[in-house]
């Protein structure tokens, strides 16, 4: 039976509020189920790979580093999907943000540029992502264009603009050495990559926002019952614009991380970012029907494709099969989500 909640000033009525005992049990059960899948994958690849390979410190660090960008993108995607939307453009927005930042850095010192230039480049990337997300949010919330169409168009438009700016090639000159040696390759205490530290900081901050603040409660409420939220006096359109702006912000941050890690722009390297991120978020328990999900679940979900890709590489499986495996996991996750949803409706 679907539970409801009286609409107080800061908590409009929702279907199955995340604060109810039922919702907490469902989210906990889903996180446990997803974590069990992650543990099973780790165990399988640890056994199947050559001894001391998969669970080596080097490989674990590589998995965490590779997952860092997806984790930041996944935070924004979690918010969007909880509202009942979708964002197919995050990989392209990452590319465009990184390209604009790189162009500025290259024309203001190049690989010798100092922190003053780097910080301006970071601001450019973050503002680009936020602005792009805001535009998409306006189209979804105000123009009432379906999120799938808006972000699919945004995917092509952002990538096209990046290719126009660079004539289809990565920015010559690369990222400044200072950025690469710190954020890209540097490690905290010589152990934890700064990319991972940044991803953890972003995840914790916005995980707390989602779980503990009015903004988070509104996000859940909009995904559960947007009409009830609107009738309670909450400006749903404005909130949706903020959510898509947040997703763009995450793509802008990820653009800087990618630029630092790969030493240059990677125009052809993010074709499947949206697939990987959506897979991670859905695997983590965020419902494609909206109203349910957690950033903690997304963290677990992000490491499933990361572990899968790493394990398949170690086993010598062709790269093409990695995409097949990730796609299959996404379909399975959506199917399980539908079964859970039908079960709750029958209950």
Image (tube, helix red, strand yellow):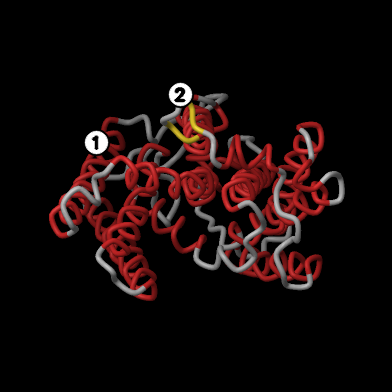
Helix, strand or loop under label 2: loop
Position in image of residue 130 (x %, y %): 71, 45
Q: Residue at x 57, y 24 (%)?
A: 9
Residue 151 visible within the image: yes
Helix, strand or loop under label 1: helix
Q: Residue at x 46, y 64 (%)?
A: 275
Classify mark 2: residues with Cα within 10 Å, few (<14), some (14-19) or many (20+): few
Residue 217 visible within the image: no
According to the image, label 2 marks what residue? 189
Q: Earlier in the sequence, mark 2 or mark 1?
A: 1
According to the image, label 1 marks what residue? 25
Numbered circle sitting on residue 214: none
Q: Residue at x 75, y 38 (%)?
A: 118
Position in image of residue 63 (x %, y %): 37, 48
Q: Residue at x 60, y 38 (%)?
A: 181
Q: Is residue 300 above or below residue 96?
A: above
- The quarter in which the N terminus is drawn is top left
């Amino acid at each position: 039976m679907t539970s409801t909640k009286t609409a107080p000033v800061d908590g409009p009525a929702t279907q199955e509020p995340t604060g109810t005992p039922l919702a907490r049990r469902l989210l906990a059960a889903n996180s446990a189920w997803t974590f069990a899948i992650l543990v099973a994958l780790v165990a399988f690849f640890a056994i199947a790979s050559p001894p001391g390979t998969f669970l080596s410190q080097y490989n674990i660090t590589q998995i965490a580093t590779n997952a860092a960008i997806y984790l930041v993108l996944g935070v924004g995607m979690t918010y969007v999907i909880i509202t009942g939307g979708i964002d197919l453009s995050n990989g392209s927005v990452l590319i465009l943000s990184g390209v604009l930042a790189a162009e500025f850095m290259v024309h203001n010192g190049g690989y010798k540029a100092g922190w003053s230039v780097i910080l301006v480049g970071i601001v450019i990337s973050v503002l680009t992502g936020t602005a792009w997300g805001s535009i998409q949010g306006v189209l979804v919330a105000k123009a009432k264009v379906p999120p799938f169409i808006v972000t699919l168009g945004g995917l092509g438009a952002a990538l096209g603009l990046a290719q126009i700016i660079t004539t289809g090639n990565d920015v010559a000159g690369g990222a400044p050495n200072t950025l690469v040696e710190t954020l890209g390759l540097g490690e905290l205490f010589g152990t934890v990559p700064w990319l991972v530290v940044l991803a953890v900081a972003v995840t914790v901050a916005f995980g707390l926002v989602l779980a503990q603040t009015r903004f988070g409660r509104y996000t859940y409420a909009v995904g559960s019952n947007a009409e009830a939220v609107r009738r309670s006096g909450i400006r749903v359109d404005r909130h949706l614009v903020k959510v898509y702006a947040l997703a763009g912000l995450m793509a802008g941050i990820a653009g800087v991380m990618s630029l630092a890690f790969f030493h240059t722009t990677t125009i052809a390297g993010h074709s499947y970012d949206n697939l990987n991120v959506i897979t991670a978020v859905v695997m983590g328990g965020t419902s494609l029907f909206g109203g349910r999900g957690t950033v903690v679940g997304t963290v677990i979900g992000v490491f499933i494709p990361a572990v899968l890709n790493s394990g398949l590489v170690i086993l010598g499986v062709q790269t093409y099969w990695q995409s097949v495996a990730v796609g299959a996991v996404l379909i399975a996750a959506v199917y399980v989500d539908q079964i859970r949803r039908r079960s709750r409706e029958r209950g």
